[in-house]
Image (cartoon, rainbow, N blue to C red):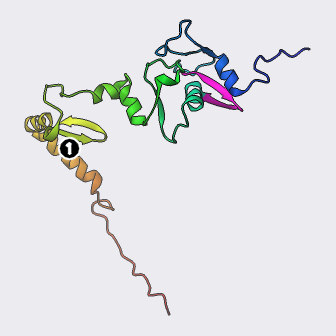
Amino acid sequence: MRATPTPFLGRTPMQRWAAMVCLPEQWREEACWEWTGGRSGRGYGQINIHGHTLGAHRYGYERFVGLIPKGKHIDHLCRNHGCVNPSHLEVVTCRENVLRGVGLASHNAAKVDCKKGHKLIGDNLYQYNGKRYCKTCRDDWSRLHPEARRASWKKYKESHHAPATSPGAVVTVTPVSGGGE
């Protein structure tokens, strides 16, 4: 049985990378370089280098521009996950990459008003567990629902200041011996 020849056998990783890039017919710097090789489930190009699967855009960026600092992400300025054009890629923090995107986090971060139209700035803004809230709406709700506010405080106190034993239990203390004798 004859083995099927591998088209990339003997090529360098950069040659293999370049063979998977589709450049535009008419050269324009602003045009995307489309990745024609394998892709991840989210549409990012992938290439296997020495047994490791790497993002094709990250590989190309490091070859044409420079190393990507540890913990940093690559943002596709063109918003095309299949693009490997280094001029369309920028090194950013994870937070910046998420906020530049089109997901829920970026949508919420762009809000300047709460649902009722109050400004989410300055003294009217508070943050809890990474989320932004309107103080005016919180204060209005507390005035309209004092019983819920009291119940919420009672539940908080019980969960954070619970006694170590059940109510009515007898606690005996055993003295610790002095030891040195």
Q: Nearer the viewer, residue 64 or 180?
A: 64
Q: Quadrant of the N terminus?
A: top right
In magenta, the rendered stretch is: 44-54
Residue at the spot x=15%, y=37% of the render?
138
Horizontally, is 170 left or right of 91 in the view? left
Amino acid marked by disc 1: Ser
Residue at the spot x=73%, y=27% of the render?
12
Query: Residue 100: x, y in percent?
Result: 37, 27
Horizontally, is 122 left or right of 99 in the view? left
Q: Residue furthest top?
A: 25
Horizontally, is 69 left or right of 163 in the view? right
Q: Indicate whether 2 appears above or below 53.
A: above
- Residue 78 included in the magenta stretch of the image: no
Q: Callout 1: helix, strand or loop? A: helix
Residue, disc 1: 152
Query: Residue 72: x, y in percent?
Result: 48, 38
